[in-house]
Image (spheres, rainbow, N blue to C red):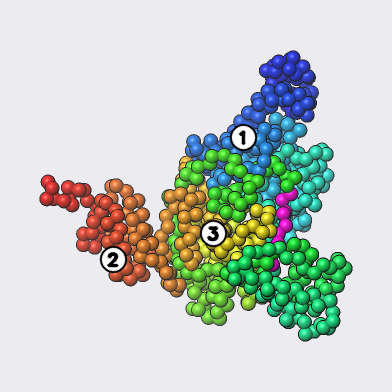
Amino acid sequence: MNNSHAQESAQEVPLQAAPEVNEVSLTIKQLRSNPEAYALVAKRLHWDLTFRAFDIVSDNLTKFGNELGEEHRLALMELVGGFTLLAFGQKKGRYAYPLPTGMGKTQSIVAWCAALHGLEYTDISVAVAAGKVEALCQLKRDLISNGVPPEAIGLVHSYNYEAGQAGELLNGYASESSTRDNDDRQIMLVTHTRINKNNLSQFNQYQGNPRSLLIWDESLLVSEARVISHKQIKKSFGYRSPDLSPDCEAVKFFNEVIPVIDEELERQRLGGEAKVIRLPVLTGLEVDIIKRQVGKGPVEEVLRSFMDISQEPVRVAYTQQEGGLISYDLVVPPELETIAILDASYPIRDLEKMDKSIRLGGKFSQGMKQYEQVTIHHLKAAAGRESMTKDFSNARMENRKVCSEVCNLVADIPESEALIIFTFKQSEGSYGAKKNVDFKDQLRKDLRSSGININAKLEEGNSTVDRIVFLTWGQETSLSQYSYARHVVFAGVLHRGHLGLASSIAGQADDILSPITTSAIKEVLTSEIAHSVYQAMSRGSCRKIIGNQACKMDAWLIHNSEDIRPRIEQVMPGVKWVPWEGKHLTSTYTQQVITQTIIDYISGLPTSLDKVSISRLKKALGHTKVPRSTFTRAMGEALEDSSGWKMEGLSLVRYSGKDYFPEHE
């Protein structure tokens, strides 16, 4: 603790209440032995830390080109103030701070840690958890550039490190080295996956005591789903059993348990309530013997996974997609009681809100960031992994409709504008995978064959950047280096399986028998898709903000329904949503949706504009391929609901009541 602050604070504390506050070497540990003195002194120290952090984050965001509105500034103050209250024990628990993307969550971490170090609060320590190693490496560099010495920062990862690799990282390499002797480092950086009950001492120890605060970047899901498809168990065993002795332990075990699961699934299908089942009791040695007998190939992977949970209480779950066994692990230990969660998706992510230990940390208005310059072009067609696998697997490009659609779109985007293309990771070819498809590679080949330079560069400030960036699901969070991209294109949208969602629902409630209905699974699925799409779009230029407006961006979304729209609009207020009439895929947009897009368009026209041609309107909304009769009906309905406009020839014209009802002059 800074001595001058201790002396200044001491003047405000009655000597009879706390005579030791006159000591220059006063520490928070000493103050805690006298509650009255601590309450008085800590109140002043909290404001010192919070205001210093607020000044740093405000200055940094302004240097990066942001213009901070009043609501934005208040939200940042509330966020860094929340860190302070939690770290000093004035507030206890797990709190979510849903600041919208691009508004300074990560920079708030940097600022608060820099203020903590600058004010010499050596008794307060913090751990920061993020999803990606490189995000932590960048965070370390940001901390150092804000005055925190390297020796105060711990960083733990298992990646390789070589000096000079920061520019072009190889797989398995990080741009900063992992550190040792972390117990004396005030600031600890760690990935989400390293946080578990077995690793507490690795990241949560500071000078022999638990750290004051854990800051969690992105969604906090305390459970990890474990799922085994019963259909795949039967297929795998059917494939393997002919090669095994009928008397071996593996054959006996699976011949006993498969009928038990069959019976339980049928009982639930007929309306029976779920229950925990216990499989035949085995010793650890017997489990290992069965795993060795089933083998180590990709086909047998399902059976080995089954054996890993065979001695735990498991639930048989029946869903509309499939049935199987579900279990879960609590991966965030309950000992971690003081957590600040920085998650822009919190308002729309149902799974996270199912965890009753998490409370809302502040009144963050989603309206503090408006998305009126962002347009989502929606092509209503199937885009899950199975549909994309079928499409991408076609031998002829004209039959790869999604690839062709993306190629035509990219060709139409001005060469001066950058874009991000999201697609799936390459299929790993494990048992049950229908095709081993490298989605990213196929897109590259098709774009190249369409005459598009996939290696084109653009000048961005003082840097040269890639015009076309390919990202896969799993990279939709944390990244900020592509915020120059004016377009985000979705060549496939991530859909989680129903069985996995059932397991996650039980895990988030920490109740293996938590009620899991078909409607609940569908709602959570919609929530997860909306979260993924929102985060992916936020890698582009809409993450940047000027005043209270997100920067201009177009998103091109292929998705089979409109179910995610209300959730997206909740976290992206003001966003425009228009149909995307594909040249290869057929959109199934309804007349009702087209009507609403017309209403939204004409209501947003400037008051100085009195006339707009129908052809211009159709082109602006992407309705050029809508059947004429459908568009005419939609236009008629739109004009009934939108006062101030009427049809006149091939244009819409603005009217006043006097113009429209001349008989009332």
Coordinates of residue 393 in the picture (x, y in percent): 57, 77
Residue matched to label 3: 523
Amino acid type indicated by mark 2? Thr
Residue named by callout 2: 632
Q: Measured from the top left, where is residue 51 in percent x and y?
A: 61, 31
Q: Residues within 10 Å of mark 1 (few under 14, many from 20)?
A: many
Please name whichever residue, 260 or 199, is drawn nearer the observer in this view of the structure.
Answer: 260
**From the viewer's perspective, is 639 left or right of 75?**
left
Calculate the distance from the C-alpha at mark 3 to the C-alpha at mark 2.
Answer: 34 Å
Measured from the top left, where is residue 112 in percent x and y? Answer: 65, 37
567 drawn magenta: no
Q: Residue at x 72, y 54 (%)?
A: 330
> Of the residues shown, which amino acid type is indicated by label 1?
Gly
**CA separation in Å, label 1 and label 3:** 34 Å
Q: Magenta part of the protein: which range?
A: 325-333
User: What separation in Å lies between label 2 and label 1 (alpha carbons)?
Assistant: 55 Å
Residue 52: name its quadrant.
top right
Above or below, 171 relative to 448: above
The label number, if any, that marks residue 81 in the structure image: 1
Q: Nearer the viewer, residue 503 or 332?
A: 503
Above or below, 400 relative to 471: below
Which residue is located at x 83 percent, y 73 percent?
Answer: 290
